[in-house]
Image (cartoon, rainbow, N blue to C red):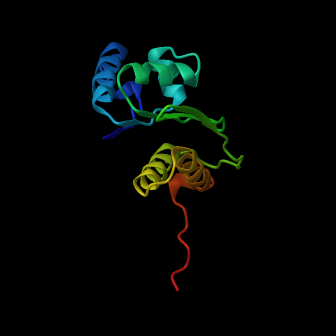
Amino acid sequence: MAFDPNYRPALWENAKTARHWITRVAMAADVVLPSFDNESALFGDDAPADTIGRYRSLGCGEITVKNGEKPVSLFAGDDLLHVATKPVKSRDPTGAGDAFNAAYLAARMAGVSAADAATQACALAGRVIQHPGALVPLPPVL
């Protein structure tokens, strides 16, 4: 099971309840795809490595921490890796995390390494944020 905690304070009764349920669900997840800004706000993580360490302690085997334009930090197998993002001009960050997750999970299910999947995911998220409302034009059909 894959899980993106995607913490949104307005959707929770309080932070304590959010921490409890996010932790419980993460314990059942094989792959966790948190965003560092959310993890820092909710759990007080100082760095992506703290986020990875916390999820590893819960038994998660693959953790991919998105961090905006900063490198993606990921733990897969026994490896801690960092994948650089390519700078793009952002018009609207809507859908960036969802696009990243979709590309990452599709690549992993196709047998692509975690590092290469993160590279592909960064590329798709970078493309999505260049268009308002996450509405990326499709290529023409031949």
Left/right placement of residue 87 relative to residue 142 reads right
Question: What percent of the width, then of the height, locates residue 37?
Answer: 54, 27
Where is the N terminus found, in terms of image quarters? top left
Residue at 53 percent of width and 70 percent of height? 138
Q: Is residue 76 visible?
A: yes
Question: What percent of the width, then of the height, locates residue 13?
Answer: 29, 19
User: For residue 62, which quarter of the picture?
Assistant: top left
Left/right placement of residue 38 relative to residue 129 reads left
User: For residue 111, which quarter of the picture?
Assistant: bottom left
Question: What percent of the width, then of the height, locates residue 134?
Answer: 52, 54
Left/right placement of residue 6 relative to residue 119 reads left
Check the image and report above or below for 140 versus 11.
Answer: below
Looking at the rendered structure, the number of numbered marks drawn on it comes to: 0
Residue at 45 percent of width and 16 percent of height? 43
Residue at 49 percent of width and 31 percent of height? 78
- Asked whether 13 or 118 is in front, the reply is 118
Name the outermost residue toward the front: 78
User: For residue 137, which quarter of the picture?
Assistant: bottom right
Q: Is residue 67 visible?
A: no
Check the image and report above or below for 17 versus 108.
Answer: above
Question: What percent of the width, then of the height, locates residue 90?
Answer: 66, 47
- Asked whether 110 or 44 is in front, the reply is 110
